[in-house]
Amino acid sequence: MARAVTTQRKTINTVIAWIVGFLIFFPILWIFILSFHTEGDAIKHPFEVLTSRWTFESYATVQERSNYFRHFWNSVVISVGSTVIGLIIAVPSAWAMAFVPGRRTKDVLMWMLSTKMLPPVGVLLPIYLICQNLGLLDTRVALVFILMMINLPIIIWMLYTYFREIPGEILEAARMDGASLRNEVIYVLLPMAVPGIASTLLLNIILAWNEAFWTLTLTAAKAAPLTAFIASYSSPEGLFYAKLSAASIMAIAPILIMGWFSQKQLVRGLTFGAVK
Amino acid sequence: MGRITLDKVTKAFGEVEVIPPLDLTIEDGEFVVFVGPSGCGKSTLLRLIAGLEDVTSGEIRIDSKPATHLPPAKRGLAMVFQSYALYPHMTVRKNIAFPMKMAGVPEDEQKRRIDAAASALNLTDYLERRPGQLSGGQRQRVAIGRAIVREPAAFLFDEPLSNLDAALRVGMRLEISELHKRLETTMIYVTHDQVEAMTMADKIVVLQKGVIEQVGAPLELYNAPRNKFVAGFIGSPKMNLIEGAEATKHDAQTIGVRPEHLVASTTEGDWKGKVVVSEHLGSDTFLHVEGTGLAELMTVRVGGEFNVNHGDTVYLTPMADKIHRFDAQGLRIA
Amino acid sequence: MTLTFRALMGATALSAVAMAAQAQDTTLTIATVNNGDMIRMQELAGAFTEETGIALEWVTLEENVLRQRVTQDIATNGGQFDVMTIGTYEAPIWGAQDWLVSLNDLPAEYDVDDLLPAIRNGLTVDGELYAAPFYGESSMVMYRTDLMEAAGLEMPDAPTWDFIKEAAAAMTDKENEVYGICLRGKAGWGENMAFLTAMSNSYGARWFDENWQPQFNTDAWKATLTDYLDLMNNYGPPGASSNGFNENLALFQQGKCGMWIDATVAASFVSNPTDSTVADQVGYALAPDNGLGPRGNWLWAWNLAVPAGSDDVDAAKQFIAWATSKDYTALVAENEGWANVPPGTRTSLYENQEYLDAAPFAQMTLESINAADPTQPTVDPVPYTGVQFVAIPEFQSIGTAVGQAFSAALAGQMSAEDALAQAQALTEREMKRAGYIQ
Ligand SMILES: Nc1ncnc2c1ncn2[C@@H]1O[C@H](COP(=O)(O)OP(=O)(O)OP(=O)(O)O)[C@@H](O)[C@H]1O
Ligand SMILES: [Mg+2]
């Protein structure tokens, strides 16, 4: 009897999980479907959309009209660049906070998080003017730097939590074995934190890839990433759903594929050579 | 080579002073064991020597060179942790090689030392495995191997055997003792275990609340404990401590008799009591006796063939020359 | 020896050519919106680069994002753009601020006098032309000829609001999802307020009197809003308070609207048989009036302008002169057909028989544009210019706030009286704050 209840529970939970998952995924699925229809079909009743003709037309138009590869490359440089630089700064910070905490460590962590509570538009003007004075408007350097600053709190927090799970004795052992601080971090801490660093890397690349506020406000032609590419297909007067969908699919496809593959990497990294 | 001197060393964590001023000298090649109740500061003391904790005040010298402010890497000591602290992402070979890699030992020399250590520690077949694929005893041997190859001035062990089962513990104990004889390197060893302390140590340091109660060879501590605390702490089972009229007879505040220094008889003796429990270990039997009017429970060791049951009456007589006398401060009266 | 010498000479010549090319290597960054005419210009702009050696970089943005980016750039003298696409709302404001470069010195063959006066006036401040119109539009009535016939009515060329009400009632068939009239309901100064402000002009209403006093407490505004709400509540589609141009376009193309009053560009969409199911049954008429003079249509143009921060003013002017010229019109006609040339900017286009033949809505567009006068948009005098907007910097936020109140009234969340009272109060407050009134 008790068993029957739990099986029933399980089924219900599974069904709920699938429904929630589907609801979350549905907009992307719908964008995907719309991208394969003509503009005229895309605004029809949902059921009619499904039954109307499928076509690559929108992709062809988008491909023809925009320099996809340039936007793509900008996105890669900005997201990977900002994340890697962020990690280089965050690893020592997180090490210090996880292994040699001071009395103010917790406060510092909270303070860093609090910077995420400020609406970005609040600092738009100063940052815009700084970039303008330094001649950094519409450059990838500016975006790499700003996105790095924006995501730094998250990177440090994530690394901090991962580092805290690493037994301090192992680092002490490295110290006893004659490792300098640098070697301790490079040979012992980082290899042990690989799964954590990988997921931090992945998450922050995704965040930077999707960042649309700063990438739109600080770029014009040269440094515009895929967010600007998507935005260029929105229109106040005229039909654009299909092309916008196609552009969106093209913009998220690389990150989706990367996420898919590195997810497998991640799971392997997590289960490999368990400690103790 | 490995003479370690602590001079008025103190350690406080915030407001709490864990080690009051403490002096201690460890001679080169000595096997020193730190014992004491849990929380008395054994690990802290060891970590101060290792350099993993900074002293609050005082001086540490290694080979008469000041080491107080040297980082652990520069002190030339090796440490074996209770949790082994192996690098989980490296093979056994890489684990053992790590300290040499850090010291810049040439490759072929590294290989030679690894092979030597591996054969001495029975690890030759496991060199390519990762720590996660080894048993507890094997891991402990890897940790020791990693310490040996550095050829340190001294080894520091913090309860290295406490995660092992009894049989393995005996084996490893012998291995470490052998190792000490072979290398003749200073070893500092922290343990809870009476047997480990008595069998392995050249010198035992008894600590209580960060204070050294007595330093000496195992038998010195056994035969002539400096105070009641050491008397009660060294020796297993514990010494019987008796106060009151019986102690006054011996001109002392307290007298102590070890279980093995009481003679038991079913017919006659000085003190009469009732058996509560008798523990038969085969070679020996320990009787717990109540109702003597001296202490709540008295422990006595008898031969394996001495046969009494719960509720039986026994008579106990202390061996006259084995009675320890302590004054009102708990100090030994010579 | 000779061989080496020749090779050397060749190399020198080559590098000389390369140097020349470099010297000419000007790049203009152009900010623009995503609409059919602009996209077409991007495709055809290769011809300009070939002709002049000036390379072009395009930044295409959604209208509101573009407005924000361009404002930011121009207000901070950012110099990111050499040419920007701006509306008729921004042109006079920014021109007056000296943020734009005057275009009075365009070459004679540009023929400034050919620009439609209504459009040109809206882009001129104190005699200086600050932007060149790329395409212009007004608003008009688009209606279903078949439904109109079935209702037994005939649409006059210049209908009155009373006729619109009558026709909307006659055409509505809610059971078959046919709604007599579709109008903008989504809140925003460029959304519902564009329509309502234009409508209010034909009702004799105005935003401000000569002393900048808000006028929402007048009977004219009350009549405007009440009629709008009656029309939409009785004959409009459900959920109209979130409908903008694209939503209404979709409804009309699917045959769900009897009439739709909106931008003249919509004509080319609703009459396009690949997207529209009612392409053959669309008629056009001027926006309605109440016999007071002004009609309920607006006037809008997307224009090209050079920000004062541009470091290539001459090249930028050269480009603007090319993109808004008669020759460009001819180029589009040659490549894409006359129906696709950008409308609403030049008189000569409407004298071209080929164009009139290809674009059935051309005449109506011209008349609609001519019917609006941005310098005298209302019955009573006003201190501002702009037909469906008030060309002051504060209008964006005030217009949107008022639009929200009216949209809420359409959604049934408040009464017309309350919406007007709220509009009056908030406009008064903002105008006081901005120092127009005490
Ligand atoms: N990092 C620290 N911060 C504060 N107090 C500490 C810290 N480390 C140890 N202590 C305190 O110092 C005292 C001595 O601790 P220590 O670990 O040296 O004891 P120990 O003798 O090794 O005990 P055990 O036999 O249980 O391992 C304890 O009271 C402990 O609570
Ligand atoms: Mg300890």
Image (cartoon, rainbow, N blue to C red):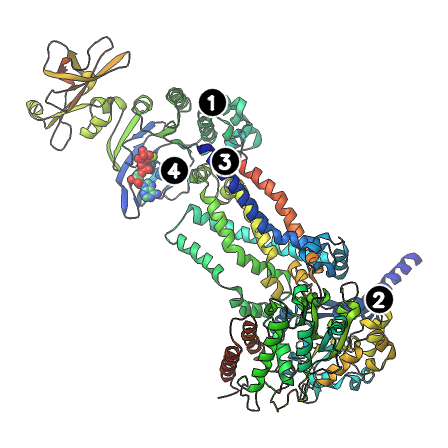
Ligand 1 lies under 8 Å from the Cβ of mark 4? no
Q: Position of residue C205 (x, y in %)?
A: 60, 86
Of residue A170 and residue B31, the one placed in the foreground of this image is A170
Element class at badge 4: helix
Q: Looking at this rendering, what residue extends furthest in the right direction? A: C2
- Mark 4 — residue? B50
What residue lies at 52% left-to-right and 27% top-to-bottom?
Answer: B114
Q: Element at badge 1?
A: loop
- The residue where tag 3 is placed is A7
Residue type at mark 4 is Ala
User: Where C65 sits versus B44, above or below?
Assistant: below
Q: For the residues marked 4 and 1, what is the alpha-carbon distance in whole angstroms?
A: 24 Å
The answer to whether mark 4 and mark 3 are in CB contact below 8 A is no
Cα gap from disc 1 to disc 3, whole angstroms? 52 Å
Instruction: Note whether B256 is above or below A63 in the view shown.
Output: above
Asked if residue B199 is positioned above or below residue A133 in the image, the reply reads above
Between the C-alphas of marks 2 and 1, the distance is 78 Å
Q: Give the CA separation, mark 2 to mark 3.
A: 80 Å
Query: Where is mark 1, residue-wise?
Result: B121
Residue C17: mark: 2
- Which residue lies at the image location 48% right of the left edge and 34% below the top edge? A4
